[in-house]
Amino acid sequence: MASHFMGSAKFILLSLTIFSFLHHFSVFSFEFQVGGTNGWVVPRANDSKVYNDWASENRFLVGDTVRFKYKKDSVMEVTDADYKRCNSTHPNLFSNTGNTVYELDRPGSFYFISGVSGHCERGQRMIIKVLTSDDAADGGDSSSGSRAAVLSFGVSKLVVVQFVLSCVASYLY
Ligand SMILES: *[C@@H]1O[C@H](CO)[C@@H](O)[C@H](O)[C@H]1NC(C)=O
Ligand SMILES: *[C@@H]1O[C@H](CO)[C@@H](O)[C@H](O)[C@H]1NC(C)=O
């Protein structure tokens, strides 16, 4: 009786562990680091389109996140009009923690600017276009390198999950 109970308790515990593992390493969303290893900085004078170039090379889907890493700077999510004018007076989001994660929670365009005076004008701003699920289904053959990387990453995570499940099975039986 007691050992049966212990077995059930362990099974529940393991199930919870696997559930949180799956939840944490969700196969279906991806985090992009803005600007790659350079992070979120004022672009060089000859490279003011760097963030929009970076954004147009990637395919963003609903549920993906973008991570901004920066020092002595900030990030704002603003309207289309405020993006165009570099107007930082009433952002939808303001963050200056140095490490900001933003979830792209709907299809359409998101506008980001630096909140530091003069930085947006020098090109530290970016438009991210998030695909609708229809766009995403159509655009299969134009998949960029990073989305391909996501898929292979997803597969490797599935392999890990299978490994964990088989370990659990051998533990239980
Ligand atoms: C921009 O200028 C820097 C320094 O002068 C140079 O190293 C770099 O190659 C230039 N980049 C482009 C895209 O012209
Ligand atoms: C920024 O937006 C606010 C509110 O719409 C407006 O009052 C202000 O004049 C704008 N500033 C600039 C520089 O456009």
Image (cartoon, helix red, strand yellow):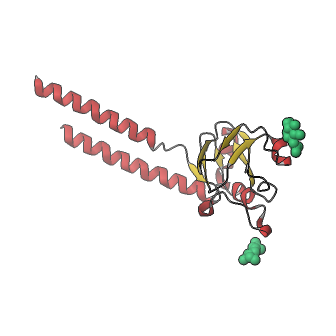
Residue 15, percent across and down? Answer: 32, 34
User: Left or right of 2: which side holds 92?
Assistant: right
Q: Nearer the viewer, residue 18 or 101?
A: 101
Position of the N terminus, as image quadrant, is: top left
Please report the residue visible at 86 percent of the width from the left and 47 percent of the height from the top. 85
Up/down of 149 relative to 6, above or below:
below
Q: Nearer the viewer, residue 134 or 72?
A: 72
Q: Nearer the viewer, residue 70 or 56?
A: 70
User: Left or right of 62: which side holds 168?
Assistant: left
Residue 164, percent across and down? Answer: 31, 45
Residue 110, percent across and down? Answer: 73, 43
Please report the residue visible at 12 percent of the width from the left and 28 percent of the height from the top. 3
Q: Quadrant of residue 104?
A: top right
On the rendering, which quadrant does ligand 1 occupy?
bottom right
Residue 172, percent across and down? Answer: 20, 37
> Hey, which residue is sitting farthest top in the picture?
1
Regarding residue 110, the answer to whether it shows in the image is no
Position of the C terminus, as image quadrant, is: top left
